[in-house]
Amino acid sequence: AKQDGRGAFHFFEVALDQAARERRQLELDLRMALSSGEFALNYQPIYDLKNDRISGFEALLRWTHPTRGLVGPDLFIPVAEQSGLILSIGEWVLGQACREAAKWPDHVRIAVNVSTLQFCHPGFTSTVMLALSRSGLDPQRLEIEITESVFLEGNDTVLAVLRQLRSLGIRIALDDFGTGYSSLSYLRSFPFDKIKIDKSFVDAITSDTSAMAIVRAIVVLAFSLKMETTAEGVEDCEQLEELRGQGCTSVQGYYFSRPIDGSAAFALVGRSTSV
Ligand code: C2E
Ligand code: CA
Ligand code: CA
Ligand code: CA
């Protein structure tokens, strides 16, 4: 039995070692990815239920690794955060997203995900301003998506940065609402433009009455605070109708479109005003 125990221990040791090596390799590869042009942005339409048209796109980062092929952001974003590479990657994302969005009609916005580390970095506001001035994009067409985790970083600086961005005309969305360290005090201390209702609630909305009640409460709360709501991960008609009935402002998900590349996004909105 003792032998078996040691054997099992050894097995975990090897597995851990392997995982650490893979992570290190991923980090090395990630370092090369920017300069080698391995990143691209995809754009997922956000559909406005009131005006019945696309009101914007969310930029989603894609990495085509030279040997592994497509690597998902859920895998490499954490590595990019731990290594600090997210700062240069995030800067590239902002520049690229603003440049692309500048081609779209004026009512179409671009939403950009910003990681907490990036948001809390002292140079963040200047990075955003640089992306805007280089692309010529109207600041009101840029929406920054942050998660509740930024509020773990000391409220005062975070609020100062949020106000600074807001004073430039940039919109702020609270992403993945309800999944993190949700505290309603954030909503009191800062007037977000939008709350994004997490996919996990949308998934359950037609099967689980408590998910339905939570979504309803979020929508009502947001409405009273004059914030918009976007439901993410909408995959079928039933979910859409439920969300529409509850008064959700906009929806996003495979039911409308998967994330698509820049030229497909442009084709979708073109220069006309509606779809
Ligand atoms: P997120 O911000 O919550 O983005 C939504 C995710 O849900 C995206 O996954 C999107 O492709 C996926 N999605 C949208 N509609 C549906 C649907 O109907 N069904 C299903 N099953 N999935 C749907 P993706 O692109 O893999 O991104 C994962 C996460 O990686 C994002 O979650 C975001 O947190 C992060 N991420 C992506 N791009 C960036 C970026 O440029 N910067 C930073 N910091 N994070 C990013
Ligand atoms: Ca997002
Ligand atoms: Ca989200
Ligand atoms: Ca999410």
Image (tube, helix red, strand yellow):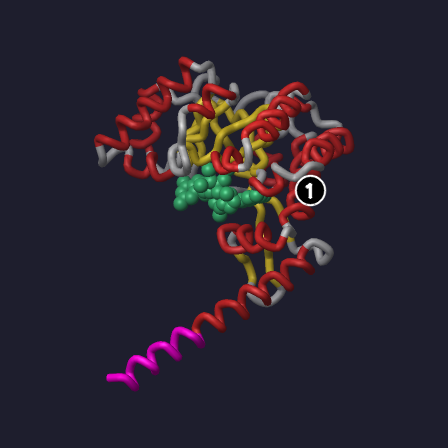
Q: Position of residue 199 (x, y in %)?
A: 38, 38
Give, as a single range, the part of the protein colored magenta: 1-14
Q: Nearer the viewer, residue 129 or 101?
A: 129
Q: Residue furthest right?
A: 134
Q: Quadrant of residue 271?
A: top right
Above/below status of 3 relative to 79 = below
What is the magenta segment's predominant secondary structure? helix
Judge whether residue 20 is colored magenta: no
Identified at 35% across, 39% down, the residue is: 200
Judge whether residue 13 is colored magenta: yes
Q: Quadrant of residue 237?
A: top left
Q: Nearer the viewer, residue 92 or 70?
A: 92
The answer to whether residue 127 is left or right of residue 73 is right
Q: Position of residue 273 (x, y in %)?
A: 59, 21
Identify the residue position indicated by label 1 in the image: 91
Q: Is residue 42 visible?
A: no
Identified at 71% across, 27% down, the residue is: 137
